[in-house]
Image (spheres, rainbow, N blue to C red):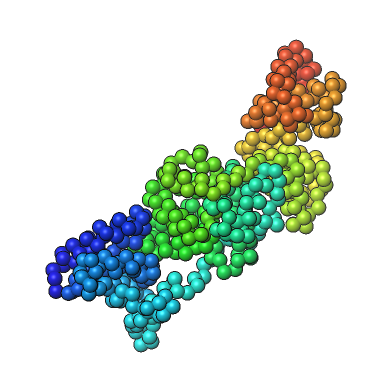
Amino acid sequence: MVLNKDCKEVWENCLKVIRDNVPYQGFRTWFEPIVPIKLEGNVLTIQVPSQFFYEWIEEHYVTLLKKTIKKELGAEGRLEYSIIMENSFANGKPFSVKVPANSATTRNEPVAMPVDLNRQGAIKNPFIIPGLKPVTVDSQLNPSYTFDNFIEGDCNRLARSAGFAVAGKPGGTAFNPLLIYGGVGLGKTHLAHAIGIEVKERHPNKTVLYVSSERFTHQFVDSLRNHTHNDFLHFYQMIDVLIVDDVQFFAGKEKTQDVFFAIFNHLHQNGKQIVLTSDKAPVELQGMEQRLLSRFKWGLSADLGNPELETRIAILRKKLYHDGIEMPDDVVEYLAYSIGTNIRELEGALISLLAQASLNKKAINLDLARKMIDKFVKNTAREISIDFIQKVVSDYFEMPIELMKSKTRKREVVQARQIAMYYAKSLTKSSLATIGMQCGGKDHATVLHACRTVNNLMETDKRFKGYIDELDRLIRPH
């Protein structure tokens, strides 16, 4: 037997050749964890951390390994593996088994594996290799988040259409990765689950996994703590459709980004589908490695905007129909007008209204809705919508909202329209152009003129100032 240091020198010489023939991340993942442990004659024994690791090396790198071993040890040079096995007994320590390299002539032949006996004397095979059998993975999908329950509108049409295309042909479209981004409560998680559910229905043999970025990070940290990093990596690399929610939480976590980068590359190169969600577009994500951001931009980034009025009404009606509840149209429309920036908040307002009516045994009507919305606004930090402002102003002056948006030049209509523009500029983050468009197709100059007119009238017209004081109480958050 040659001294121990000689096996290290032989393996180090092999690594110099391997390093030049394997991508950097592949080298780090599959060769850095290997430990040379023995050199006997022309046989080098290397230790690998798991049976899955052994199987992967044999499948993907055996030709390269053979060449480098023969280069170092001559034509008769051979390689053997020492595989660290987990002991299933209580308090059992890991043990190793020895396997010759390339022990099966084809991928379909079974590899001759040693067996051991458990404490009852029954034979068990320690080599239950995930790659050789289908592995059952709990997809972690919420069955209620389907495409049928996802209301389509102008605000989400691109994202929904792309998601549906991905579900029909995962990994086979230009939308890989598909990154869905938007603010809180706009339906990112719902759409991500819907894609996963649709994939499972259309492609039952595909392995689908939904995971939040926080859960992914916790799993990764646990794998480092428990020395199961490679098992963690191999598990994620066998997923066919990986859905990661809220990737913005990877920001600042360098090691988590490194391992996700490796998983991302492996899945993408093997034609697997990746779906991501984020609260911001890739260009706005802070604390992320540039190489990871560049991967996010490979496919399609589709945004979810604030739902327009028609979409909000449709969402409420869909939920009421699903729950078997009837509600007057004017109440539904009032809720939709009142809350315009967040679907989750909109559904929360509906639940609050139903609870108020049930607990107080009151009929659901417009008066109850107004009182509930008033309390809801006080207890909820939110941005007031232009639709809500227009609804309050039109109700206050007792005119149809369509009349206020019309091109008529009647004094009372023009004044109501100008007040709506004034509040929209004061209380929303919308641009002047957006405000003008929603207030009857006016331009930004008209909006500025309206704001100056309202300010002037408040200073010179007591009756007008009274209108504004009363509207303040109805519109502004208290």
| Left or right: 103 as drawn, with respect to 399 | left
Whole-percent x, y for residue 106 in the image: 40, 77
**Residue 469, located in which quarter of the rendered image?**
top right
Whole-percent x, y for residue 274 in the image: 52, 55
247 over 28 or under it: above or below? above
- In the image, 145 versus 208, the foreground residue is 208
| Left or right: 134 as drawn, with respect to 252 | right
Residue 81 in view (yes/no):
yes
The residue under the point 70% across, 26% down is 423
441 over 303 or under it: above or below? above
The residue under the point 70% across, 20% down is 445
Whole-percent x, y for residue 377 in the image: 67, 37
| Left or right: 358 as drawn, with respect to 258 | right
124 over 44 or under it: above or below? below
The residue under the point 54% across, 46% down is 278
**Residue 193, located in which quarter of the rendered image?**
bottom right
